[in-house]
Image (spheres, rainbow, N blue to C red):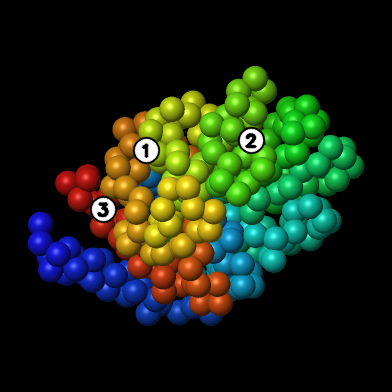
Amino acid sequence: MSSSRLFTRREALKTAALGALTLPLLNVRTDAAPATPSAADSEHGLRFGVAGYTFRDLGVAESISALKALRIKNACIFKNQLNWETATPDEAKAVAEKYHAAGIALSGTGVVNLTNNEAKCRQAFENVRVAQVATMICKPDRDALPLVEKLAKEYDQRLALHNHGPEDKLYPTPADTFNAVKSLDSRIGLCIDIGHSMRAKADPVATLRQYASRLYDLHLKDSAALPGALADIPVEIGTGHIDIRGVLRTLLDLKYSGVAEFEYEKVAANPVTGLAESVGYVRGILAALAG
């Protein structure tokens, strides 16, 4: 296929995605029934959400408006909107109710740091419980893993450890997270970040297949960084080095039942345009695969 045809296809997908932004972004209805993660949200076999870090400079209302405009029904909440580690249960419930009222389920959290301190860990677990979050995305200290397993059982809460690339001292690769949880209760699994995986020289497609049994969440992104790079170069999905088509085909082959969370990190103050382009590109690839 010629470069001109690729450009035309990409521009078409971008245009379709940006068309969603003509919807109102501020006056979101909040009279819908509370939402829970559901297979009914599937698009050609996959469910999508947005990782909270994407909206790290936006408030709750702005984030909800963007999700509604992009027709995405699952979301993670980052600490700027609700700090899972320090909030009270009442605060967690109040924020969650705003998403639920807009018809958006809370599929995950921003990365929650869990130390070997039961009172602090229990506070995070209680906040996640009252907010009705499907999966706590987290980074436990190694010595906190027995405590985290105990609380996961007590709260019947699913957890997913997040890999953060070669600069991460605890969990640089999905292999590191898997080795940390493989002997623990099955409620504890992985949130595979395909961008950080690639930079840590872990092929995203091979990694998804290898650890599918504990794959509970996924951060879907692209990067212009090269394998081994300590610094990420986030870009719109489809413009970087990651085999996005291969990732999507693999998720379909695996019948992945979790949520694939778009994580767009290139622009913090106004992420919606780049996020919309990424969403449109992925939807276009999925439609082609389904056809």
Q: Nearer the viewer, mark 1 or mark 3?
A: 1
User: Mark 1: which amino acid?
Assistant: Val
Q: Is residue 260 above or below residue 155?
A: below
Q: Residue furthest top?
A: 183
Does residue 8 appear to the left or right of 237 in the view shown? left
Q: Which residue is mark 2?
A: 158
Q: Residue 72, position in %: x, y? A: 45, 59
Does residue 276 appear to the left or right of 124 in the view shown? left
Contact between labelled residues 3 and 1, with CB atoms less than 8 Å apart: no
| SS assignment at label 3 | helix
Q: Is residue 119 above or below residue 17?
A: above
User: Could you say which quadrant of the image residue 160 lies in?
Assistant: top right
Q: CA distance from mark 2 to mark 3?
A: 30 Å
Q: Which residue is mark 3?
A: 285
Does residue 201 appear to the left or right of 63 in the view shown? left
Residue plotted at (72% across, 39% down): 140
Q: Residue 99, position in %: x, y? A: 60, 61
